[in-house]
Image (cartoon, rainbow, N blue to C red):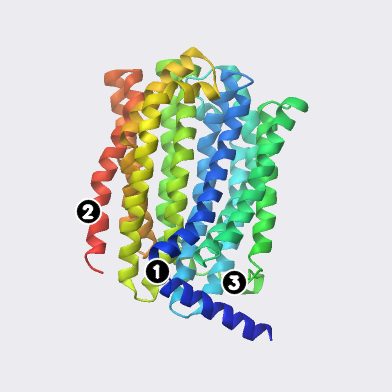
Amino acid sequence: MSIFRKLNETSDRRVRLTETPVPRLILELAVPTILSMLVTGIYNTADTFFVGRISTEATAAVGLVFSVMAIIQAFGFLCGHGSGNYLSRMLGAGNRKEASEMASTGFAVALIVGASLTALGFLFMDPVTRLLGRGATEETLRQTESYMRIILVGAPLMTGQFVVNNQLRFQGSAVYAMVGILSGAFLNILLDPLFIFVFRMGVGGAAAATVCGQAVSFTVLLLGSRQGGNIRLSVRSVRINTHYIFEIINGGIPSLFRQGLASVSAILLNASAGQWGGDAAIAGMSVVSRVLMLICSVVIGFGQGYQPVCSYNYGANLTARVKEGYYFCVRYATVFLSVFACLLLVFAPQVVSFFRNDPAVIAVGSRALRFQAAALPLMGTIFISNMMLQSIGKGLKASITASARNGFFFIPLILILPRLLGLTGVEITQACADVLSFALAVPMAWSELRKM
């Protein structure tokens, strides 16, 4: 009986993904994903908010460790997007066996990679802390190490939850994915003030709250993967061979580049901010990064609602639906970002002061936030173009567009502009990189859309 029920659920899912009107389907899948990304962004920002009540050094420390978290997330996205893209295309083509093997293999690889990152982090703790905190005070470095030690313990949980979350999304089970992420996020937000202020754990309490939240999300997502017609993860289905590893890398390498280069760019940004403005500049740029991440998380969630539609229909050779979804997402993402760009241009000082009421932090943060707001409307095209290229298996083009914003353009600019313009050069670097990334993403996406 369960076999027939599973077949019916699989058939219903195929009809839903290939026949439901594209705008309605994307919104159905995007709403829970947007909520997941938004709450994730809020709980990532929660650490910055609560430690901002401790000191400027604590705020700077959380900003410095953000680059380490970005590396862990990068490998989680590598395995999650790589396995998710492939299993979705296989489901679209009617090949459930390979989809099942890829799901279990991607999850197993993520756990191995997460455990390896934990070991490497503890082995090289001091040099990594010194590298991250160039220009920071000794007190900031001490708090950075306290925060990072606990975050590293949760690395396997973080990589594992990203894989299951993305695999659920690519199967069209965005609600299960949302419940898993939200459960951990809400716990994190509740535990932050308890650990930091009641138990007086300082920045270590913020890190502990984050890891507890990740553990809950990891558990709930695993339970969600066993519900409905979702593919069940099984040790017997793990196939760590060249075929599946290649497909994980091909489909996930853009995410690794995007997140990995975000980590590199954060390290360079913090070093440059520390050189030209000290702890206040590091804290100010950290606040700006978290605010922009929170806004962009909505657009990324919107795009992630498009990804299963894109990959499934591309695998089913329904390319007209792929194109329709692309233009729908770009149009509405640009409108959304334009509204927030106007708000940030007007209220930048108030936004920064909400996190840290320090005149020096506000001065740096409000200028940088206004520069980035000017380029914010371009981000919709950049994100959706990259997601479309990645979802249809165009690994090279997706990797190039993913690497542009925080790599090809940002890294040279952060090395050059501050030398020419001082602290102002630090504040305008990301906005300049975004403009150049937009100019690259448009022809890359158009070259594939024209073929469909």
The answer to which image quadrant residue 275 occupies is top left
Note whether residue 350 is visible: yes
Secondary structure category for the residue under label 2: helix
Q: State if disc 1 and disc 2 touch (CB < 8 Å).
A: no
User: Horizontal placement of 355 versus 419: left or right?
Assistant: right
Image label count: 3
Residue at figure coordinates x 39%, y 76% from the top left? 316
Type of amino acid at the residue the image marks with label 2:
Pro
- In the rendered view, does 189 fall on the left or right side of 378? right
- Looking at the image, which is closer to me, 264 or 158? 158
Compare marks 2 and 1 and give the one earlier in the sequence: 1
The residue singled out by tag 3 in the image is 231
Residue occupying image coordinates x 69% and y 56%: 219
Label 3 packing within 10 angstroms: few (<14), some (14-19), many (20+): many
Quadrant into which the N terminus falls: bottom right
Question: SS of the residue at dot 1?
Answer: loop
Q: Which residue is mark 1?
A: 21
Is the residue under label 2 in contact with that under label 3 (CB below 8 Å)?
A: no
The kind of residue on which mark 3 rests is Ile
Disc ID at residue 443:
2
Whether 210 is drawn above or below 13: the answer is above
Q: Tell which residue pokes out farthest to the top in this image.
A: 359
Identified at 30% across, 64% down, the residue is 323
The quadrant the C terminus occupies is bottom left
Q: Is residue 129 above or below residue 186?
A: above
Q: Residues within 10 Å of mark 2 (few under 14, many from 20)?
A: few
> In front of the other: label 2 or label 1?
1
57 or 235: nearer the viewer: 57
Q: Can the viewer see residue 263?
A: no
- Identify the element where label 3 is drawn: loop
Residue in the image at 41% along x and 42% along y: 261
Q: Mark 1: which amino acid?
A: Pro
